[in-house]
Amino acid sequence: MNYTVRAGDTLNSIAARFGVPVQELIRVNNIAYPYYIYVGQNLYIPVTATPAPTSDVERRLTRVENRVDALRDDYTKVDDRVDRLETRVNRLEARVTRLERLVPGPVPTPAPTPPPRPRPTATPRPR
């Protein structure tokens, strides 16, 4: 299918309209970097692609579903990280417990070091 670029069109908006990946549009039309298109340009839209949702409600629903999927992935990543951190905390607590058993009593704090004494200043010798 052919499409003529209109004012305000972008590769992203055209791809969304026809349900085609942007990279596919770029590839089949041999659009070179920096991927400029211009008004009146004819673009080939691959017909094997599934058509975009027909109504605004369907488009919005698809967008919400994609966002929910992305949030679910983020949640899974955060949950995995929390599990790893809990494991580390448990290991550290076990190490502290073992160390507390090895030390018989409270660890004495070292005495503070006194401040350095000022050096005497040299006085010139009389001639």
Image (cartoon, rainbow, N blue to C red):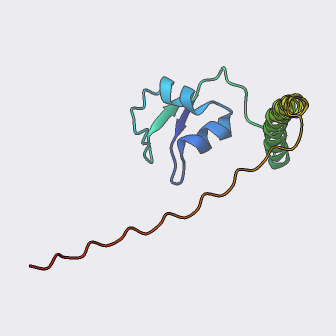
Q: Position of residue 17 (x, y in %)?
A: 67, 40
Determine whether 53 is above or below 45 in the image: below
Determine whether 48 is above or below 41 in the image: above
20 or 113: which is nearer to us? 113
Determine whether 94 is above or below 125 in the image: above
10 sits to left or right of 17: left
- Residue at (86% x, 44% y) in the render: 106
Name, please, the residue furthest toward the top. Answer: 48
Q: Position of residue 73 (x, y in %)?
A: 80, 33
64 or 109: which is nearer to us? 109
Q: Position of residue 64 (x, y in %)?
A: 83, 44
- Quadrant in the picture for the N terminus: top right
Give the number of marks. Answer: 0
- Quadrant in the picture for the C terminus: bottom left
71 or 80: which is nearer to us? 80
Name, please, the residue furthest toward the front. Answer: 127
- Residue at (46% x, 27% y) in the render: 29
> In the picture, residue 68 is in which quadrant?
top right
- Residue at (84% x, 38% y) in the render: 75
108 sits to left or right of 5: right
Q: Position of residue 85 (x, y in %)?
A: 82, 34
Name, please, the residue furthest toward the left. Answer: 127
34 sits to left or right of 80: left
32 sits to left or right of 106: left
> In the picture, residue 59 is in which quadrant?
top right
